[in-house]
Image: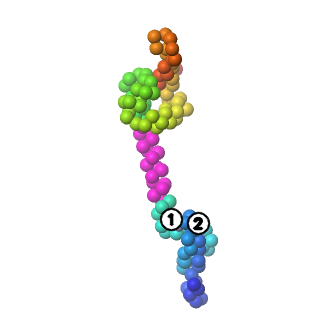
């Protein structure tokens, strides 16, 4: 819909939801995003930040609990932190990548499969 010369309405297609909208803004509307998609993007960003914060908190908890107990197996960490196994593993992997946590393995009773223990890297 074109509304005369004094007030030009541009049609634009939202780059996120692909719906067509009209705008009377002066800027060229080729790369526009609609209001509801702006809000959605902001929400998504916030929830990603929230998830990241949660993850950081879990890493702090892992460090705290290792500080307290010295060395623990993955199973013990899962049990003590009461978090999903995969979440614990992922966060341990991050801590190990940053050299914050290290592992050593010990055979139970000197035989069988060695048990892996996690402990803080005390700068050794
Ligand atoms: Zn949209």
Snapshot quadrant of residue 69: top left
Q: Are the residues flagged by discs 2 and 1 in contact, CB closer than 8 Å?
A: yes
Label whose residue precedes the other's in the sequence (2 or 1): 2
Q: Is residue 43 magenta?
A: yes
What residue do we see at 51% from left, 14% from top?
112
| Vertical comparison of 7 with 121: above or below | below
Q: Is residue 45 magenta?
A: yes
Query: Mark 1 near ligand 1 (CB under 8 Å)?
Result: yes
Q: Nearer the viewer, residue 60 or 15?
A: 15
Query: Mark 2 near ligand 1 (CB under 8 Å)?
Result: yes
Where residue 15 is drawn, which disc sits there? 2
Horizontal side of 1 relative to 70 (left or right) equals right
Judging from the image, what secondary structure is the residue with disc 2 in? loop
Residue 79 drawn at (x, y percent)? 38, 30
Horizontal side of 73 relative to 99 (left or right) equals left
Judging from the image, what secondary structure is the residue with disc 1 in? helix
| Vertical comparison of 113 with 78: above or below | above
Where residue 26 is drawn, which disc sits there? none
């Amino acid at each position: 819909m074109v509304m005369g010369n004094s007030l030009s309405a541009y049609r634009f297609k939202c780059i996120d939801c692909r719906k067509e909208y009209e705008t009377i803004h002066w800027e060229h509307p080729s790369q526009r995003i609609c209001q509801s998609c702006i809000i959605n993007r902001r929400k998504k960003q916030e929830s990603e930040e929230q998830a990241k914060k949660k993850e950081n908190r879990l890493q702090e908890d892992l460090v705290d609990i290792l500080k307290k107990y010295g060395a623990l197996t993955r199973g013990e960490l899962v049990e003590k932190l009461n978090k999903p196994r995969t979440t614990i593993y992922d966060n341990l992997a991050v801590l190990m990548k940053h050299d914050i946590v290290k592992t050593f393995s010990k055979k139970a009773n000197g035989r069988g499969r060695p048990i892996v223990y996690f402990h803080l890297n005390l700068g050794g």
